[in-house]
Image (cartoon, rainbow, N blue to C red):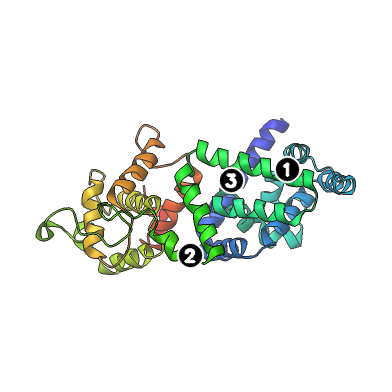
Amino acid sequence: MNDNRNNFETERSKEDLKAWIESHPHEYGEVAMEMGEADLFSVFLMAQAAFISSPEFQKRLEDMVDTDSVDVGELVEILHQSRFTEKMLTNPNGNEDWEKYRLPFAAWLKYGRSSEMVIENIEDAIALTDNQQAKWQLSKFLKDVMKRLVGTKQRSREELSEYLDYRKSLVSGNIAEWALSGIDDTEEDTLSPIKPTQTEEFIEDLTALVASHDKDTVTYIGNWLKYNVRGIDVARLYVALIETDEIRANLTVTRYMDALKTSFPKVKIVGTRQVQKDVNYLQSLLPHGKRYGKEEPENRFAIDKIKVEVLLKNLENID
C-alpha cells in the first residue's frame, strides 16, 4: 500500500513540476539565471532542500565536518532513503521559506544545470578547501562527472577540451587566439557566415519555407539564433518546427540550413554537417521514430521551450 502511495505521489510531483514550468516560464528563467550567476545561491538552495528533507542528513554532515571526514556516498544514500526528491517537490511540511523556491529549483535541477557550470562549481569547491584529502576526493568526483558527460554523450571530449581551452584564454587574456584556433581556411563548415550550398536563386528563405509564412515568427527565430548557434540548438529548432507543423518532417537538414543562411546571412551559425549529426542524435532518442527526445528530459524541455518562447505556440494545441 505504501509503495502504491509513494508511486502516486511521485507521479503527481512530476505533473506538478511540468505544469509549473509551462505556466511560469519567466519565473523559471529568473531562477535559472540566478543559479548560473550567483556563486553560492545554488549551494544554498541545495543545502536548504537537503536539510528540510532529512534532519539526519544535516546531523551527519555536521558530524563529518567536525571530524574532517566527509563521506559523499553516505550522504547521498541518506538523501535517497529520505525520499529527498519527493519531499523537495511536494513540500509536505509546508515550509514557507522553501515554498517560493521549490518548483523553480526543482525545474533547474532537472532541466537547467549546464555541464560546464557543474564543473566550475566543483573546481571552486576544490579551491576553497585547505584539506588535502578533501581536494583529492573532490578531484576524483570531478573526473567521474566528466567521464559520465562523455560516456552519456552529453558532451564530447572535444567539446570539453574546447571549453577548458576557453577558460585558459580568459585567464591569459588571449580570447581572440582561442577563437581563431581550429578554424581552417579551406573548411566549408565554419562558424563564420556561410554561403548557401545551392545556387542563390533556387533557395527559399525561411518565410517561404514555414507553413505559416509569418514574417514575425521568422524575425523571432533570427533573434534567437544570434545567441543559440550550437549544432544542438539549431537541431532542436529544426525539431520544434517539425513538431509544430511549420516544416515537413521529410525536409532535409541541408535545405533547412540553406533557408537559415539565406534568411540570416549575418548570423554566425554552426555548419550543416554538425547540425545533421545533432539531428541524428535527437532522432536516436525516438521511440520507434514517433517523437523527438520524449524520454530525454533536457532536450524535450529545450524543444518545448522553443515552441513556446520563439514560435509562440500553445503546447496544449499541439498533438
Which corner quadrant of the image does residue 81 belong to? Answer: top right
Question: Given contact means CB atoms under 8 Å apart, are the residues at marks 2 and 3 in contact?
Answer: no
Q: Residues within 10 Å of mark 1 (few under 14, many from 20)?
A: few
**Residue 114 in sight:** no
- Disc 3: CA contacts within 10 A as few (<14), some (14-19) or many (>=20): some
Is 255 rendered above or below residue 178?
A: above
In the shown orientation, is residue 268 left or right of residue 90?
A: left
Give the amino acid at mark 2. Asn
Identify the residue at horizontal 45%, vertical 53% (top origin): 302
Q: CA distance from mark 2 to mark 1?
A: 30 Å
Where is mark 2, residue-wise? Answer: 174
Q: Amino acid at mark 3?
A: Lys
- State yes or no: discs 2 and 1 in contact (Cβ < 8 Å): no
Q: Which residue is denoted by mark 1 in the rendering?
A: 136
Q: Work out whether residue 296 or residue 4 is closer to the camera in this orientation and state it.
A: 296
Image location (x, y in percent) of residue 57: 81, 45
Marker count (numbered): 3
Query: Which one is in front in this view, the residue at disc 2 or the one at disc 1?
Result: 2
Identify the residue at horizontal 31%, vertical 55% (top origin).
Answer: 190
Q: Residue at x 22, y 58 (%)?
A: 259
Q: Secondary structure at mark 3?
A: helix
- Going from N to C along the chain, the mark reached first, 2 or 1, is 1
Disc ID at residue 14 = 3
* Residue kind at label 1, given as amino acid type: Trp
Earlier sequence position, callout 2 versus callout 3: 3
Q: Earlier in the sequence, mark 1 or mark 3?
A: 3
Kindly state the secondary structure of the residue where label 2 is placed: loop
Q: Return the x and y of residue 313 as percentages of the image width and height.
A: 37, 59
User: Which tag is nearer the camera, tag 1 or tag 3?
Assistant: 1
Q: Determine whether the residue tagged by mark 1 lies in a helix, strand or loop.
A: helix
